[in-house]
Amino acid sequence: MFEERAQCNNLPDLLSQLSGAIEQHQRYAYPDAMTTVDSWKAILSQPVPSEGIGAEQVISEIGKYVIPNGSQMSKPGCSSYITTAATDMGSIATIAGIVASPQRVGITAFNYLEEVALSWLAEMFDLPEGMQGVLSSGGSTANLIGLGAARQSAFEQVGLDPANDGVQRACKIYATEHSHHTVHRAASVLGMGRKAMVHVPVDHMMRLSPRELKRLLIEGKKSDALPVAIVANAGSTNTGSIDPLQEIGEIAREHNIWFHVDGAYGLPGTLDPQAHDLYKGLALADSITVDAHKWLGAPVGIGATFVRDVQAQYKTFNQGAAAYLDTTTVQKEQVENSMDALGFPYHDLGVELSAPARGAIVWALIREIGREGIKARICRHNAMARRVADLVKKHPHLELALEPTLSVCCFRYVHDNVADLNELNKKIHRQLMKNGINIPSTTMVDNKLVIRPCFLGARTDWHHADDLVNEVLEIGNTLTS
Ligand SMILES: Cc1ncc(COP(=O)(O)O)c(C=O)c1O
């Protein structure tokens, strides 16, 4: 029988016992988890153990059956999702937070580093002065927070208070069909409903059309629905396109509507001098999001929202006083212990009370390589997308769907003898997945199924651009020969 208290003894030692498996995973030495799925599932699917096996045995099982059957997403050639493996510093800082700051509250270095990290993000990405930031679990929550503040602001303008009284009017949120579906979900969670989404048509680069937006806003005035927000992409998930932020911002001001910019993926793109001008209109935004767990290489679970009207945000998300918290009764001048106060009240600006200390992770990532290091990564990835586009344009069996704006490049294999190119490209993608080295996703552009790499990982290097194109050609040639 293993002592219950043994659970809390020896973290450094236990971590060192795992180092072999971690190292193997980081060398991508393990085959895909599906190759042995039946055997590891059989080993792991057991009834609740009555007696424990002790820490060393659990570590051994983690090393043998869990880590080896982890995700392919950590591979440097994986460019499908807009998340990758954390950088080593991201992992270390996560452990530091878990060990030393189980909650983000209190007058601690961790709570303080949330302030520092948010101000660094705002400064690095040229965000408008005076916006208040808050960290949350990722882009889904970050969009929810921005749109929660937008809802409050819009309703207050017509004398209503949705935070207290609920949503009493039909709403409209304007965005393109390329807006991330978490925006639709936010509309649903905030009681406005998915039907509040109005899809604004896009131009040939998949960017919101300002002319169409104006038309829809004027048309919308004929209905009783309250216009709550215009949502723009600063880097869409599908194609990396950036909506014309300046023009949209001006329209939003003219119509007095909240302007939300989803930069979960693409906001760091502003560091690339070749893309920087596309972000000019950020100055007009009312709320902006960016995910540290995308281009910045943080472990999954970190997004940020910056909001101009912090009162609207506070009214939506404050949790009210709780009698069980001593901190609410200690006067400011009586604070003498790190637990006498909650530190900056981030819990009143989002949907979490308990939350990990995310700020220290973002701080550590930026501290490690600085603004210039992050800029170099972003420039490398954007240049890789352009490199793919160049290679594609030069080859008769490849076709570019769209010039890349950021680090996404959409293209497909073409062949005169093949009628169904969607089916052919689907097959090519299936084979890429099977080979497991270069792993892009697919998407639809103008009804064409295209191969879509999104270069993002800190470990993803120059050669992965050429490698992917060569592999697509190789597979395409075999399938059509
Ligand atoms: C533009 C954009 N917004 C929001 C999200 C949702 O982010 P998360 O998966 O962190 O919730 C994503 C995810 O890829 C995204 O690309």
Image: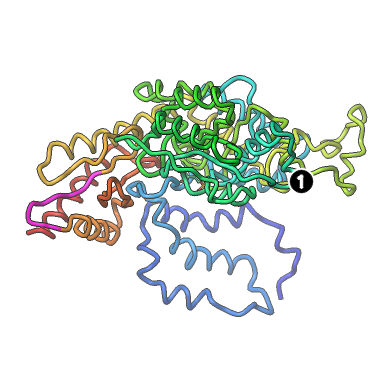
Q: Residue at x 48, y 78 (%)?
A: 42
The percent coordinates of residue 187 (x first, y second) are 58, 47
Q: Residue at x 62, y 51 (%)?
A: 189
Image coords of residue 451 (percent x, y) = 27, 49
Q: Which of 269/25 is in front?
A: 269
Quadrant showing the N terminus: bottom right
- Can residue 87 be seen by looking at this rendering? no
Which of these two is toward me, 411 or 16? 411
Q: Is residue 407 left or right of residue 331?
A: left
Does 412 appear in magenta?
Answer: yes
Please give left or right for residue 473 compared with residue 271 in the image. Answer: left
Task: Give the number of callouts.
Answer: 1
Q: Residues within 10 Å of mark 1 (few under 14, many from 20)?
A: few
For residue 412, above or below residue 380: below
Q: Position of residue 315 (x, y in %)?
A: 74, 37
Which residue is identified by label 1?
A: 165
The verdict on residue 5 being magenta is no
Q: Which residues are magenta?
A: 411-419
Q: Main secondary structure of the magenta part?
A: loop
What residue is rendered at 61% in x and 26% in y?
A: 119
Mark 1 lies on a secondary structure that is helix
Residue 139 seen anywhere in this rendered image of the structure: yes
Q: Determine the residue positioned at 47% across, 54% down.
A: 22
Q: In the shown orientation, is residue 481 left or right of residue 166? A: left
Residue type at tag 1:
Asp
